[in-house]
Amino acid sequence: MYRLVAVLVLSIYLLSPSMIDSWSNMERPWYSPFMIWLTLIGAVAWLEHKRSSDDL
């Protein structure tokens, strides 16, 4: 549980400036910041699922 919180807090700290910059940059598609977050959420979900499987 604490690892999940640590990953989310660290990722918010690291990705927030890039999201603000990408929203102000109109050269990229509008969904690019959301793809970064979707990748992060998928990675955390996979790690939690893997950890839950190992705990059995």
Image: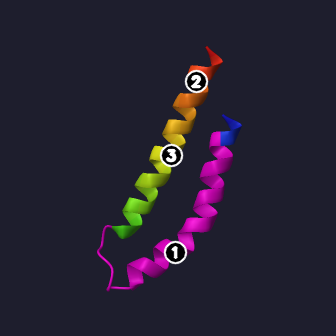
Kindly report the distance in space between the C-alpha atoms of the residues bearing marks 3 and 1.
Answer: 19 Å
Type of amino acid at the residue the image marks with label 1: Ser
Residue found at x 64% / y 49%: 7
- In the picture of the structure, the residue carrying the numbered disc 2 is 52
Q: Is residue 54 magenta?
A: no
Residues in magenta, as a range = 4-31
Q: Mark 3 or 1 closer to N-term?
A: 1
Mark 2 lies on a secondary structure that is helix
**Which part of the image, by quadrant, shows the C terminus?**
top right
Residue found at x 58% / y 24%: 52
Task: Return the x and y of residue 18 as percentages of the image width and height.
Answer: 52, 74
Crowdedness near tag 3: few (<14), some (14–19) or many (≥20) residues, C-alpha within 10 Å: few
> Among all residues in the image, which is located at the extreme top?
56
- In the picture of the structure, the residue carrying the numbered disc 1 is 18
Mark 1 lies on a secondary structure that is helix
Asked if disc 2 and disc 3 are in contact, CB closer than 8 Å, the reply is no
Kindly report the distance in space between the C-alpha atoms of the residues bearing marks 2 and 3.
Answer: 14 Å
Looking at the image, residue 29 lies above or below residue 54 = below
Q: Main secondary structure of the magenta part?
A: helix
Type of amino acid at the residue the image marks with label 3: Ala
